[in-house]
Structure formats: C-alpha cells, structure tokens
Amino acid sequence: MTTPSPTDLLSLAGRTMLITGAGQGVGKQTALVAAAHGAKVVVNDYHLDRAETVAGEITEAGGTAVALRCDVTDLDEVTGMVERAQATFDGIDILVNNAGNAGPAQDPMAAAPPFWETGPKEWDPWMGTSFYGVLNGARAVLPGMVERQYGRVITVISDAGRVGDPNLVVYSGAKAGAAGFSRGLARAVGRHGITVNCVALSAIRTRGVATATENEALVAAMLKQYVIRRLGEPSDAANMILFLASEASSWITGQTYPVNGGFALNQ
C-alpha cells in the first residue's frame, strides 16, 4: 500500500469550502490557504466588498472562488447563500464558522460594563453571531452533507469560551455554547461521515488587536500570559483549520483545538 505524502493528506482538491466572515483576518487567511491547497472557496462576509476583494485575490492567483454576502444571524439569509453556493459548486463539503463580532461596542478592546448592568440589548449581538450564526451555518449545510455522506464543520471559538473572561461574560458564554453544540453535533452526524471540531483562539493580530498593539506597555503585559511570547498570526489559525478540513484529520471529531501560544493549556 502506498502511504500518502503529507502534501496529499492536506490537499483540498475537489472540495468546496464555505467560510463565514472571510473578508478579513483569520477568515481571509483561511480562504487563501484553502485555495492554495486546491479548494473551491465560497467567501462570505457581511460586507460584500470585502468578500469580493478576497475572492479576487484567489482568482488572480489561479484559484477558484465566489463572493457571497449574508448576515449569519438570519437563517433564511444563510440558507439562501448556501443554495446559491451549491448551485455554483455543486455542494458544500467544508463549513468554517468564522464570523464574529465585537459586541455592542464594535470594538474588541473597549471596556465592557459589568454583566449585571446589561440586558438583552447588549447580549443579542454576541449571541446572534457567535452562537446562532454557528447553528444557522450548520443547519444550512448539513442536509447536503448528510446526503453525500461527507462533511467537515469547523467553528472558530475563543479561549474566552474555555476559561472565561470577566470582561466578556456573554461572549464567553456564546463561544462555550458553540463548543458544546459542536460536541453534540459531532455525536449526531458522525455516522454520516461528517466531522465537527472547534479551533479556540487567543490574541491574533487582526484589526482590533493590531490597534491595541500600538501601546507597547499593553503588549508587554499581554505577552506575559503567553508561553510563546508573541501574538498569534492569522496564518497560525488558518493552518489548524486546514488540518481539520483535510483527510489528515479524518478520525478526529468533537474536539476543540487551542491555537493560543500557551495562553490556556489543556489538562
């Protein structure tokens, strides 16, 4: 028997990957990495111009991509987007639930009021994207995956969902909920050849974090919490997502993989 090379195991040739929130940051890098490994990529973002820019980069590099806008908090919109993607690429093999938000303040580094001074108005933006967005994406793609008896569902969460963040209590709960949902879903769909996993991130050098890193004292304090004393890069997350999307991870499901420089360790 011929043993596949590592490159073959990570190949996504013949697969279609849908990535939510792929107009920037981790989603964008995941789209570029997936395309470089042969995937046809559906680039989703709430802002169509961002999605079109990323899809354009992929096609200019010789890959295959389409840009589609939708609001992941709206199941009808997500279902419609998946239907359009399936009409273009004949099915979705891999879903990456990457879309996130910064909550009501729309600033990931802004100080949040204590939980007991908030209510549904402040909670809903977190829950809508980080929890219901995950449910909506899975609900839209799973009928096709079950029919084809193959699929990958990968959800990007946060270490806040693993260890809790006193300043982001609802966000922590939404991300923990997405991880719990993924574990339950993994048990429900494994017999259909579908794996379900999460990637938990800490500080990745994206737009909001990049703004914070202009403060050298704040960066120094942040890095003391990390075993590997640097911020994460979008490529660190994208490489793990590639692994979970590939045949190299075919017997892995129901797991959460931290990509966090040692911020919070598994036990």
Image (cartoon, rainbow, N blue to C red):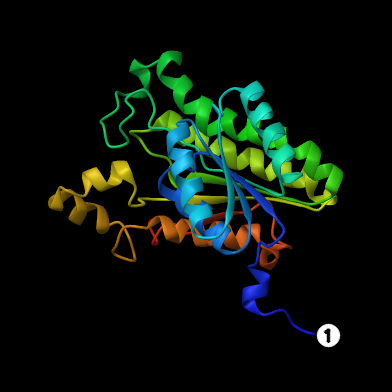
Question: In this orientation, does residue 81 appear?
Answer: yes
Nearest the camera: 1 or 253?
1
Kindly tell me whether residue 30 is visible in this rendering: no
Residue 245, x across and y down, in percent: 64, 57
Q: Is residue 117 left or right of residue 5?
A: left
Q: Quadrant of residue 132?
A: top right
Is residue 89 found left or right of 213 in the rendered image?
right
Residue at the extreme bottom of the image, as rendered: 1
Q: Is residue 9 above or below residue 206?
A: below
Locate the N terminus and report the quarter of the image it occupies: bottom right
Percent from the top left, x then y, of residue 253?
69, 55
Q: Residue at x 79, y 85 (%)?
A: 2
Q: Position of residue 28 (x, y in %)?
A: 46, 49
Q: Position of residue 238 (x, y in %)?
A: 50, 57
Pointer 1: residues within 10 angstroms few (<14), some, or many (20+)? Answer: few
Please give left or right for residue 229 compared with residue 179 in the image. Answer: left
The residue at which mark 1 appears reads as: 1
Q: Between 120 and 47, which is closer to the camera in this rendering?
A: 47
Label 1 amino acid?
Met
**Residue 82, picture quadrant:** top right
Q: How many marks?
A: 1
Element marked by disc 1: loop
